[in-house]
Image (spheres, helix red, strand yellow):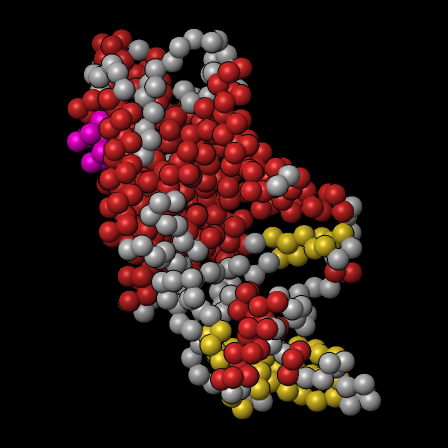
Amino acid sequence: MRPLLLSILAVVTLALAGCGSDFDTDQMRLCRQAIPPLNPPNARIEIERTTNGPVPRALRLFYRVELGDGLSRHRSIDCLFAGEGSGPSRGALVGIASDGRPMADASFYLLRRFYLEDRASPPPDPAEPAAETLPAIPAGLAYGLQQGLSALPSAAIYGMLAAAYALVYGLTGRIILSFGEFAALGALASVVGVALLLSLAISTPISGLVVAFTVAIAVCALHGFAMGRFVLRHLERATGQQMLIATIGLAIAMSEYLRLAQGPELRWLPPVFNTPIALAHAGDFVVTLNPLALALAAIGLGATLGVVLLIRRTAYGRAWRAVSDDAKTAALFGVDARAVHDVAVIIACAACGIAGVIVTAIYGGMGFAGGFSLGLKALVAAILGGIGSVSGAALGGLCIAAFEAVWSATLPIEQRDLAVYCLLAIVLIWRPGGFFGDGELTPRRV
């Protein structure tokens, strides 16, 4: 899995090199939104170019204003943003200067409170292609394509976590209920890694992503080794619910551990490579693609495929399948079942770290309590696909992502999580082994 992950990172690095920007898409849009109230109501505004302002964290836009009498005037606006912090107000707009003259505090407050917060439409970005130049597709296809592209990161996240559940369950027949917290641990580790990188004055987006993945995988693998050695190994001969209860307690302890480590507030990463790429249009609706989301989805899905291939085509995979089928018989042929189990736990926790980085890079951050719901959904995905099979569990993650995308597109989004859990109940009733697992209604150890 490691060579595959490194190769994917190298490809993404070459593809995205040189695409970074000091300001993200939302900040540029917000600065463009502030232009119309500074000009006459019926003026036609055309953005000419974008550059850095005269002070750090300032964005300068040059634009042309055409009045109704045919006269035109070249103007500029400077938007000052707060530095990258750790809270939700990071990178917020804190000041505006029009043609080099700073706006008064009262005027800036009124502009931000009663105009910018109303999501007013900004002048178009000259770098964005006009909708007429894009391929035209039917409205239903455009909406479905947009939902499918938006679901790719979720598919990678659920696939990685579901594969992690299956890796351990296939050997022990036990569910580890702390993998969601391992994803939250990977999210925090990625933020810490990027913060250390910034302290060394190395702040390129590519290096930040590489360090985030490296630190998250290392930290989660180390914690996974500790969990396997000091918790799971002592319960490997238990026949009841001891392991399930122990991992629930471990999940609670890890959540509190993360809360003490990062505090009650979220720790955020600045957005990178989030300038949308227009693909097609259906009238005024434009289908866009987020480059970062696509790259991270490719990394996550590639890593999931790497885990599947590891089980199917390597020596360790043969040992894993042998122990999964019959540990005692495998031991007679020289297979160390305990070593196979330890490696599976480490790989599973490293996969959770990759999922945590994807969540953090796309959504900005992940709270200390965010791992519970994420891990529960991934468990639903693993059971849906067949928790005893790594490939089946990964496919179950893709199915849950597709189910959420269809539900969000057609039904109330606030009921989506409830529908996912109801789907779990339906699957357990009609096919306990999952879609790709054993369909017999036989009792299973949990």
| Residue 233 appears left or right of 309 | left
Can residue 235 be found in the magenta stretch?
Answer: no
Residue 248: horizontal and vertical position, in percent?
29, 31
| Residue 205 appears left or right of 37 | left
* Image mark count: 0
Q: Nearer the viewer, residue 13 or 169?
A: 169
Quarter of the image holding residue 377? top left
Residue at 54% in and 91% down = 101
Quarter of the image holding residue 134? bottom right
Residue numbers of the magenta segment: 225-232
Q: Is residue 335 above or below residue 100?
A: above
Can residue 230 be found in the magenta stretch?
Answer: yes
Residue at 55% in and 74% down = 112
Residue 87: horizontal and vertical position, in percent?
38, 62
Q: Nearer the viewer, residue 371 or 422?
A: 422
Q: Is residue 356 above or below residue 17?
A: above
Q: Is residue 442 visible?
A: yes
| Residue 346 appears left or right of 66 | left
Residue at 34% in and 57% down = 265
